[in-house]
Amino acid sequence: MRTYEPSSIERKWQSIWEKRGVFKVSTDPTKPKYYVLEMFPYPSGKIHMGHVRNYTLGDIVARVKRMKGYNVLHPMGWDAFGLPAENAALKHGVHPAKWTHSNIEHMKAQLKKLGFSYDWEREFATCDPEYYRFEQRFFIELYERGLAYKKQSLVNWCESCQTVLANEQVEEGKCWRCGEVVTTKEMEGWFLRITQYAEELLEDLNKLAGFWPEKVLVMQRNWIGKSEGAEIEFFIPDLGKTLTVFTTRPDTLFGVTYLALSPEHPLAVEIAHQKGFENRLLDFREKVRRERKNIEEGLAEKEGFFLDTHAIHPLTKEAIPLYTANFVLMEYGTGAIMCVPAHDQRDFEFARKYGLPIKVVIQPQEEPLSPETMESAYEGPGLMVNSGEFTGLSNEDGKKGVTEKLSSLGLGRKKITYRLRDWGVSRQRYWGCPIPMIYCETCGVVPEKLENLPVRLPLDAQIDPRGRSPLPELREFVDTTCPKCGGRGRRETDTFDTFVESSWYFARFTCPHSPEPLNKEDVSYWLPVDQYIGGIEHAILHLLYARFFTKALRDLGYLDLDEPFKRLLTQGMVIKETYRCPRHGWIYPEEVSDDGSCLRDNCGEKVVIGKPEKMSKSKCNVVDPDVMIEKYGADTVRLFIAFAAPPEKDLEWSDHGIEGAHRFLRRVYNLVEEYADTLANLEYREEDLTGLSDSARKLRRKLHQMIKKVHQDFEERMHFNTGIARIMEFLNYLQDSLKEMDLGEEKNLRLLKEVFEKLILCLSPVCPHICEELWERIGKKTLVAEESFPDWIEELTKEEVINLVVQINGKVRDQVEVPSGIGKEEAWEIVSGLPKIQKYLDNKTIKNVVFVQDRLINIVVT
RNA sequence: GCGGGAGUGGCGGAAUGGUAGACGCUCCGGACUUAGGAUCCGGUGGGGAUAUCCCCGUGGGGGUUCAAGUCCCCCCUCCCGCACCA
């Protein structure tokens, strides 16, 4: 008898799949399609457990759908531009291109070892000119439509990465990639007008409800940050100019006691110039910028100063003082606000600090407010007071009333504001897609001609030791001719944010070799992605950009859909417990002795076992997929990962757990192997399986119940952990059952053949290699990968007898085996005769009997 | 503060309003062994009676129901996201 040797089995089947091109697909409108996509990786060097989990989940989905008869697109590629390649170049002196390609090669080999069913013929890397040429083309077309533009702006700057960051890439004031504190800087850069799609991006989230995690939808909604209110104009006589503010509370207009401008506001600058306190304003602005970082820690106090200027209230015509204040953001609304201390907490704090008046204009029902005694602003609803003609209205009616009044006077209007900003895509980096624009002294900014695309990233650049992009110094790249006038031109040397590449790769996977950017037939057949799987860390950035790009490409005529990803699964992290030594910090598990002391440098300190955390080198809790594959095989790794937790939850790596998974596969292997030769030449038909003994019939019933449950868990609910549990449960039952079954009877052998066949098929999406092997061992000539998922016979899943639970007043008091399907009367007949139950019925009055067929009978007594 | 999610054995986790704890891990006992950290068999929520049982139990408190981990209300804790957004 053979023993289970994963490594040889896995190599064997991987090469057979490859040779036969099992996972190759093509557009075929006669077949139902299914597109499953996992977020493609950055080629950082090697695969980690997070990837393994992501891709295992995707592969199970792909294999299940294939077995269910779908034409399945399951591609893989590389998000290959990005900063780490440049960092590696600096550190090891390898060119980013070389580093990237060798990483790809290594990681691809790792993925192949895991037996993922990708159509590798569709593979591409985003650093291929054949990929990014189309990206450049899209950009030019967006530019021509006014959806891409260049502007000077205050940008987030990471000194360590030497580049600009998008708002989304700043996390708690730090660079999302390297953790360096982000500063601000005035800079020119290219922007994509994502704000033009703000409303649609928000609105279409409703289409995704139920298919995307609620959490992601909420995060995107917050990010887009729609708020409805009004723009109101305040005339400044000293300047002869109008200050426009945005407010969501026009109903509080009569409570305005001051106006506040961001220190960056152009009118603040103008006033400062006129009144001669420019330096004071500049100092203040600098201070505020520095303190932005403190704001996260909640340390910054409200601060500002009087601008020695007044504006005219649009309705009361009162003179309202102008302040500049640190809590007013230039980037939001109009950069200036009207301040109503009585009804806004921030305005309240500022007013108290500087002794500004507080005027109540909204009175709540309960307790009247008075400015003297208020300890905080009242932001709730109420009736309007001190508000001229609006006094007495509810504040909700007031919002409308005041806005309409202002509108009629031409001093305001209804306004919707979004928090979402345009997407800055310029990066001062080398290893990225060149932005295909040319600066000409006579023509200005001119896009490269489409026929000249791609603008190739020069690969012979010398990496600058200071970490700066070498492109601006590269004459043969920079010097060019103007596409318009043929005169001297200078190329843009910024490259795209790498999120541009990942914003449309899913579409290119449908036609990776097409000479057109996107082939109509392919994209309309395959898109949208039916199931997208990836980490929650992309909840905003990548997913919002990709949604935007989809809509933009639709409007350019390349796509015919609104949303790219029909269903989204955000899988949890792979975590593992950590060990900490008081002297050495994080240490490896093997540096902990049995009695829990630190072994590093014979230190002996008591080791603290930390809670499980995301695997990371610095915490010494990583598990290398290669080591696990080597030790247990890919099937075991896949099985454990799919079994240990539901997909969306964090998965705690357990050395014992993976042993358990491996033990299970060995049991499957040994069991099938034991009977393989006997069964190899045996076939069965449905009519062979009639007239079975009780125990054989029961086994067959368990089999069909298992198939049904696995189908539901794998295909409908995507709860792989419980599906696998059902397979394990079945194996346990099968082994018990075999002890009693007479295998001298041919009927039973034929049944066993059915059992093995279907068991193997059910397990195959999770553990494809061992299943192919066993399939072959029981005499099959086909490939499991090309088989259908087994059907179950509903009739066979029905129990013949069931355990009827007998409750008295809702408490379980007994159970009795009865034929399934019996009615209430029959059940009562049986149950009322049970001695245990009679005991409970003595001297009691039966008030009610509740009967749930095949489940329970509940006798209510008093 | 606002928003989202979650609290179930020693652990990971199961349970269309219908036997709470499937499946796996751990641990305990047994078998086979020169040996086992291999394999197989049995047990494993708590407490009590231990022949056959009983009581308690899904973060806490109320409620709806014949019946609640599941539905409703209040509270507590933890995780995640957002946070001077006017």
Image (cartoon, coloured by chain):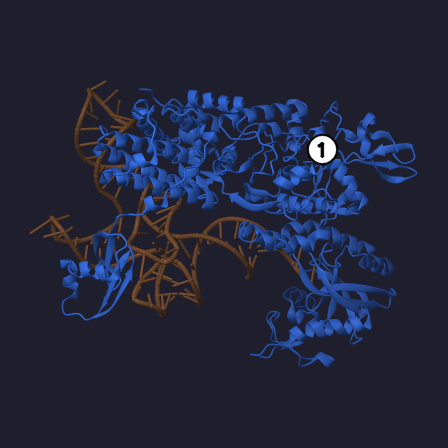
Chain colours: A blue, B brown
The residue closer to the viewer here, A670 or A49, is A670
Q: Is residue A188 visible?
A: no
- Residue A95 vs residue A755: left or right? right
In this rendering, would A316 be left or right of B51?
A: right
Up the image or down, A223 lies above or below A23; here it is below
The three-letter amino acid code for the residue at tag 1 is Tyr
Q: Residue at x 22, y 28 (%)?
A: A744
Q: Secondary structure at mark 1?
A: helix
Image quarter for residue A723? top left
Q: On screen, A388 above or below A641?
A: below
Residue at point 59%, 35% (across, down):
A40
Q: Quadrant of the C terminus of chain A?
A: bottom left
Q: Is residue A186 above or below residue A458?
A: below
Q: Is residue A814 visible?
A: yes
Residue A360 image-quadrant placement: bottom right
Could you tell me which chain the residue with mark 1 belongs to? Answer: A
Residue A363 placement (x, y as % from top left): 62, 77
User: Which residue in the structure is indicated by mark 1?
Assistant: A132
Q: Is the residue marked by circle 1 packed among few (<14), some (14-19), or many (20+) residues within 10 Å?
A: many
Q: In the depicted view, which residue is nearer to us: A744 or A763?
A: A744
Quarter of the image where the N terminus of chain A is located: top left
Residue sitting at 68 percent across and 54 percent down?
Answer: A200
Quarter of the image for residue A140 reads top right
Residue A601's x, y, as percent?
43, 26
